[in-house]
């Protein structure tokens, strides 16, 4: 995207005459200067909207993890991500709409005024969001432009090794955590859409992100994962009151993107998926009625993944999740407790037992969706759910329950499904490929950055969706 802008600029320069016509390019109605705070909040909003929206042009992960299906149009459900240019849109969102704004915000904050604790905090917060966005790109594509990605002088950025990038991101995150200081301020509550200006909450968020990123590489580098996990775990989210929540509002334009695509649009496209509906029904999961609304006869019937589904005959996303003010979650207690349960099974130093953390995670998930403590206790007593009697290894137990709990957080659900390998999902009807372990690179990269694209594709044995990322070992 930045290449197109650069090329256009060169053409304008080449076509100019000797007269100075630059005055015609001056914007007279709008400010050409955007404040760092505005860029920061805009980048945050674009990142969270991308993770939240169900729009088939942008986010297909609910289909990939088989939480949702479609009534009529099956392209994305069947892993056709090329027709609507899904990789291009995801790439553009992260690089152009998130990272470019963060990079400019960082430049402006760095150049503004003397060094203060507040300035240091702001730079750390910006960098944490850059780490967040870059790790999303790594977990989507693998090798990506990184060291040259945000340099406007590099028209054809090279691709960096995914593992090298990921480890550098972890180092950056640790440095950011060490710089955050509660004695100073941050961004204003209005501009800080994640923590409302609360530096303590940023410390919780950053440590929780380190826990997540550490556990992501546990099968690749257990020793490093252990060290990073143990350094951050005690400072990560430890109760539901500390969840990192992005708030939407009941009036446009700051509404939940799910409401936009389901309610405001009036379209009848999105339906439940049979794999998750059946698991919820078979275990009497109290989240069934919180995740979905029943069909026209009051029954919870899951849609066939990849098949045509009559809209009236199947369950749909609930009114709760499609409310205009339903929030997005960036990190929560349930997720952290699942990581603690897994860490205990891996032999890491963490208080409590794997079973206790597993139970805490499930209870937190049920409560966060509006269920009761009694609902959670009854559910956990089921032999198919109880940690001591549920089927399989810890991977299967934790993986299956995490897949359920990450409803409406489909990107993280996709990462955990690839990493833990449970539950085992069948391919959708009419699948165009094997299970997507990654996205192929955008076509625009093939066209405009062909040499580096070809090198990146050759390095992983071809640009294929089935190719596993460096941390996906099983």
Image (tube, rainbow, N blue to C red):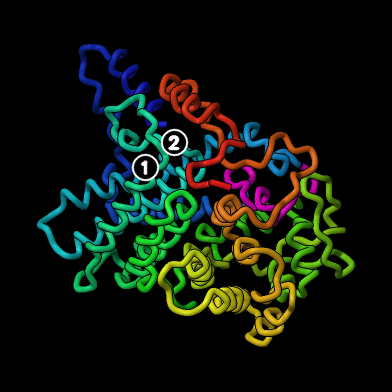
Q: Is residue 225 magenta?
A: no
**Depth check, front residue: 162 or 341:** 341
Q: Quadrant of residue 349?
A: bottom left
Q: Looking at the picture, how far across and down is residue 355, in whole percent? A: 57, 76
Q: Position of residue 17 (x, y in %)?
A: 25, 12
In the image, the segment drawn in magenta is 56-73
Q: Is residue 322 visible?
A: no
User: Is 65 colored magenta in this rendering?
Assistant: yes
Q: Mark 2 and mark 1 in contact (Cβ < 8 Å)?
A: yes
Nearest to N terminus: mark 1 or mark 2: 2
Q: Report whether 327 appears left or right of 397.
A: left
Q: Quadrant of residue 407?
A: bottom right
| Residue 103 sits above or below residue 447 on the image | below
Label annotation for residue 143: 2
Dividing the image into 4 quarters, which one contains the N terminus? top left
In this rendering, is residue 182 above or below 422? below
Secondary structure beneath dot 1 equals helix
Tell me: residue 225, above or below residue 343: above
Residue drawn at (66%, 81%) of the image: 376
Alpha-carbon span between mark 1 and mark 2: 8 Å
- Callout 1: few (<14), some (14-19), or many (20+) C-alpha neighbours within 10 Å? many
Q: Can the viewer see residue 254 in this picture?
A: yes
Q: Position of residue 119 (x, y in %)?
A: 19, 60
Using the image, tell me which numbered label, if any, was put on residue 165: 1
């Amino acid at each position: 995207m930045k290449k197109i802008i650069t090329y256009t600029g060169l053409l304008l320069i080449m076509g100019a005459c000797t007269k100075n016509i630059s005055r015609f390019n001056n914007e007279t109605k709008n400010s050409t200067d955007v404040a760092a705070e505005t860029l920061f909040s805009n980048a945050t909003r674009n990142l969270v909207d991308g993770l939240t929206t169900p729009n088939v042009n942008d986010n297909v992960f609910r289909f990939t993890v088989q939480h949702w299906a479609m009534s009529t149009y099956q392209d994305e459900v069947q892993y056709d991500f090329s027709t609507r240019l899904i990789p291009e849109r995801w790439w553009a969102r992260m690089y152009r709409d998130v990272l470019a704004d963060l990079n400019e915000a960082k430049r402006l904050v760095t150049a503004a005024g003397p060094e203060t604790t507040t300035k240091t905090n702001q730079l750390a917060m910006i960098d944490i969001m850059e780490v967040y966005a870059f790790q999303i790109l790594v977990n989507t594509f693998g090798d990506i432009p990184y060291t040259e990605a945000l340099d406007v002088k590099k028209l054809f950025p090279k691709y960096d090794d995914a593992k090298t990038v990921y480890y550098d991101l972890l180092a950056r995150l640790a440095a950011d955590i060490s710089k955050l200081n509660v004695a100073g301020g941050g961004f204003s509550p209005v501009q800080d859409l994640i923590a409302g200006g609360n530096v303590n909450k940023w410390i919780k968020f950053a440590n929780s992100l380190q826990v997540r990123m550490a556990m992501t590489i546990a099968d690749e580098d257990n020793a490093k994962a252990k060290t990073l996990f143990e350094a951050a775990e005690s400072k990560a989210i430890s109760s539901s009151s500390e969840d990192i929540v992005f708030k939407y509002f009941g009036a446009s334009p700051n509404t939940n993107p799910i409401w936009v695509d389901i309610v405001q649009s009036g379209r009848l496209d999105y339906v439940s998926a049979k794999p998750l509906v059946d698991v919820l029904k078979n275990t009497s999961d109290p989240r069934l009625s919180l995740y979905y609304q029943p069909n026209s006869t009051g029954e919870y019937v899951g849609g066939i993944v990849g098949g045509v589904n009559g809209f009236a005959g199947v369950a749909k996303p609930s009114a709760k999740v499609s409310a205009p003010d339903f929030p997005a979650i960036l990190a929560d207690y349930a997720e952290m407790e699942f990581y603690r349960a897994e860490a205990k099974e891996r032999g890491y130093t963490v208080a409590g037992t794997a079973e206790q953390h597993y139970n805490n995670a499930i209870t937190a998930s049920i409560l966060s969706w509006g269920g009761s403590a009694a609902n959670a206790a009854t559910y956990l007593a089921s032999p198919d759910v109880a940690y001591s009697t549920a089927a399989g290894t810890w991977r299967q137990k934790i993986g299956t329950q995490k897949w359920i709990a990450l409803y409406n957080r489909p990107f993280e659900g996709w990462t955990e499904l690839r990493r833990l390998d449970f539950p085992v999902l069948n391919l959708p009807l009419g699948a165009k490929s094997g299970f997507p372990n990654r996205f192929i690179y955008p076509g625009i990269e093939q066209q405009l950055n062909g040499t580096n694209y070809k090198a990146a594709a050759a390095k992983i044995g071809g640009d294929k969706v089935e190719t596993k990322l460096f941390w996906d070992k099983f």
